[in-house]
Image: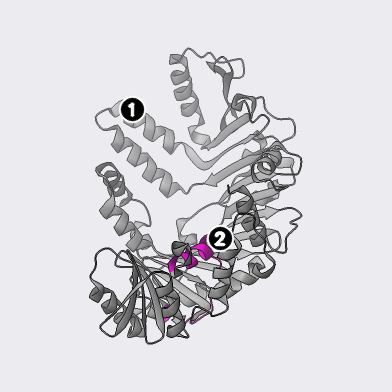
Amino acid sequence: MKNLMNLKLMCAVLLAAFVFVSCADKGSDLLTMVPKESKLVMVVKPLDLAKKADLQNLTLKNVPKETFDQINAFFNGDMGVDPEEVAMFEYQNNFWALFNVKDEGKLSSALTGFGYGKESVNGCNIYSEGRDKIAVKDGLGVLVTVYGDDLSAVTNSIDRFLKLPEGQSVVSIPQFAESMSGKDAHVYLNLGAVYAMAEKEANPYDRRAMEMMKQMPMYDELLQSHAYFSLNFEKNDLICNSVVLDKDGKNINGKFNFGNLDKGMLDFFDGKATAVMAFAIPQQYLDFIADAIAKEAGSDPIAANMAKTGVSSLDGNMAIGGTLKNVQNWYGNDYAAVIKIKEDMLPSVKTLLGQQLGQMGAVADSNGNYSIPVDRDLTLNVGFKGDYLYVSNSVMPDKTFASSSNAGKFSGKTGVIYVDMPKGSILASAATMVTGVDLSGYFYAWSDDEQSEAVLHIDDNPESNILKLIIKTVDGMSR
């Protein structure tokens, strides 16, 4: 019980249960104390979490009343903590959380009652339980998980937070405040710092791949950029938006030169397809991939030339998808993949593919298409239709996805992932069986030359907000 009642876990319970919900306000005082070099920043407003989740009327099967009482103590101020806002961030490879303390006497009494030890270091009261430290100074509460027992290092960091010049905090980053406000949750990533950390911790094979990435178009600009993610909970939808801004706060999505998806690829999928994923890859990135593959081929010039020719022939449009028909037998489902070939490269691609399939014993039919037995229950159909090369385990559909009501979701987009779960479908039935909740809806993620968005939609949500439905569903699945 002690661990459930400490403030760190209290925050963790709130964060996990409410999926990092927040409603960040522009110009947060806590954010002015977050160093600019932080790799990751999140902002949470616990009181707004509670409203979204309808905490006062929430009844969960697997959360004891005692735990609810502890959470309520956090919210109503009995622990001396201001529940309006918590700012979390990475700093010097430690995780920190800042919050305002209204009554340190109440907080001290609560923490010592939970089994925390207390000591004063450099004018800062520090409460400790294992590696978890909660420090209080000048009305600022700081939660930190640190390695080692050097508490003076903790207090030095807190002093820096309290006295941080405006130009050294994250709020000085162009468009940071605007990008971290207005939705239910906000997350910030310093892409250059994250990449540097990944590079430092990578194994030799990964380092080799990361070295190759340095030749990638836009590499230098990406390292100086910042990614922002926002989350919003509505009645029937959970919506996540993301955008990448350069060091001057300008959107860089358009600089990747993405083209719009070729919707002709949707003709290769059934009108009732369960999932379709499609992307339009810019030519500069196809060239990069072709060069990388050729280098990987090393001393085999024939293989290197074939790989480079194959990638260079791509138009950049590609899609994969399928229709779920049988959850017991995956061979009983329909799958298809399609790529668009540059028109002037079609003859050479057909010749190259014919040679490779011929070596496998495959023989083309009168239309130049192939049927390749993989095993007793699976045969792949490989062929060309216009500029498209396709691979499928089923016949071409009569009613295609291109003529469905969902085809419009692919218009004007550079990439799309769509998963359909209509009421009565096998996928909806499976989800209902697993969760114990009658679920139907869809997942739709897309990108264009401005931003990216992902939407989880639930039909006929019986709860006041999708957040409450998620919490109750997770609780019902707990054992």
Q: Nearer the viewer, residue 141 or 187?
A: 141
Q: What colour scheme was applied to this rendering of the protein?
A: one colour
Q: Amino acid at mark 2?
A: Ala
Q: Quadrant of residue 452?
A: bottom right
Q: Nearer the viewer, residue 405 or 264?
A: 405
Task: Confirm whether the magenta stretch covers residue 13.
Answer: yes
The picture places residue 39, in percent across and down from the top left corner, at 36, 65
Residue 17, labelled with which disc? Answer: 2
Residue 206, numbered label: none
Residue in the foreground of this view, choosing between 19 and 366 = 19
Give the answer, above or below, for where 384 lies relative to 238.
Answer: above
Span of residues in magenta: 8-32
Q: Which residue in the structure is indicated by mark 1?
A: 303
Number of residues whose C-alpha sits closer than 10 Å to that of mark 1, classed few (under 14), some (14–19) or many (20 or more) = some
Q: Could you tell me residue 256's position as x and y percent?
A: 46, 56
Looking at the rendered structure, the kind of residue marked 1 is Ala
| Pointer 2 local density, CA inside 10 Å: few below 14, some 14–19, many at least 20 | some
Name the spot of residue 47 as percent of width and height, x first: 58, 75
